[in-house]
Image (spheres, rainbow, N blue to C red):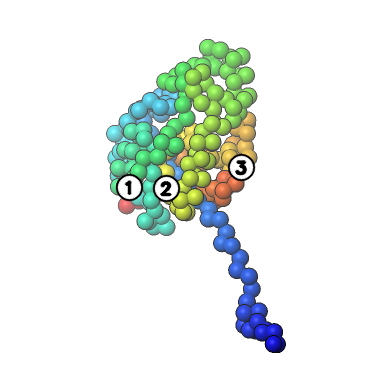
Amino acid sequence: MPKTSMPEKLMSEPTAKPAPDPYFELICLRHGPTEWNRLKRLQGRHDEPLMPQSRSDLQSLKLPMSLSGLDWYSSPLLRARETAQQLQLDTRIAPALIEMDWGDWEGQRIVDLRLKDPAGMMAMETLGLDLCPPNGESPRQVQQRLTDWAESMRRKGCTRAGALCHKGVIRALLAAACQWDMRGKAPVKLDYRCLQHFVWDGQQWHLRQANLPLELR
C-alpha cells in the first residue's frame, strides 16, 4: 500500500511558539504628607494621618486618563488609605506595600541620630541595601517582600496594577530596577508627588517611567 503523504498545508504550518511570560506593571504613588513628614521624623509603621492641607491638595488632583480602569492596591497604613480616598480610588489592601520598618529609630530624625552616634551612624549608612535599624528591616528585605508579591500577582495573570505606598517602598523598587546598592546618590531623581512606573518581568525589576504627574480635576 502506498504511503499517505502529509497534506501540504499541514506540512507548511510553523510550530506554534509558546506565549511569552506576562509582565507585571506596578504604578506607584506615595501617600500625601503627614505631620511627621513635615518634622522629618522616620514614620515606618507609625500610623500617622495626612495633614489637613494634604487632603485639600489631593482633592484637586486626579489620575491621568491613561491609568483609568486600573486596579489599585494600598498599604494598610492610614496615610496611604486616606490618599486613596481623597483621589477617589477604590483600593484593596496589600500588606506587602507597607512602609519599611524603622524599628527603634521610628519617630526619630536622621540628623539627631547622626549627632547622637556619628561613628555608628556612618558605619550603618555605608551598608546601603543592608542598612537595618535595630529591631527593624533593611531595604533588601523590603525588596524581597515586594518581589514575592509582584511574582504572585504575575502568576495569577495580573498584568497591571496601581499601588498607594511609601517612599521606602518606592526607593527599594528604584534600587532593584537600577541595580543601585543605595550607597551614594540615587541614579534617578524621583519626585515623590508623582507616579512611578515599574515593571517586574519574572526575573528583574525595571523602571519604565519616572515622575508621571497627577492632573488637575
For marks 1 and 2, give the CA distance: 10 Å
For marks 1 and 3, give the CA distance: 29 Å
Marks 3 & 2, CB-CB < 8 Å contact: no
Q: Residue at x 59, y 45 (%)?
A: 204
* Numbered disc total: 3
Q: Position of residue 26 (x, y in %)?
A: 47, 48
The numbered mark at residue 112 is: none
Q: Earlier in the sequence, mark 3 or mark 2?
A: 2
Q: Residue at x 29, y 34 (%)?
A: 52
In the image as oriented, which residue stretches furthest toward the bottom? 2
For marks 3 and 2, give the CA distance: 20 Å
Marks 1 & 2, CB-CB < 8 Å contact: yes
Q: Secondary structure at mark 2?
A: strand
Q: Secondary structure at mark 1?
A: loop
Q: Is residue 140 left or right of residue 38?
A: right
The numbered mark at residue 162 is: 2
Q: Residue at x 42, y 44 (%)?
A: 163
Q: Position of residue 128 (x, y in %)?
A: 60, 28
The numbered mark at residue 89 is: 1
Callout 1 crowding tier (Cα within 10 Å): few <14, some 14–19, many ≥20: some
Q: Secondary structure at mark 3?
A: helix
Mark 3: amino acid: Cys
Which residue in the protein does label 3 denote?
Answer: 178
Callout 3 crowding tier (Cα within 10 Å): few <14, some 14–19, many ≥20: some
Most foreground residue, 185 or 147? 147
Q: Is residue 30 left or right of residue 147?
A: left
Q: Earlier in the sequence, mark 1 or mark 3?
A: 1
Mark 1: amino acid: Leu
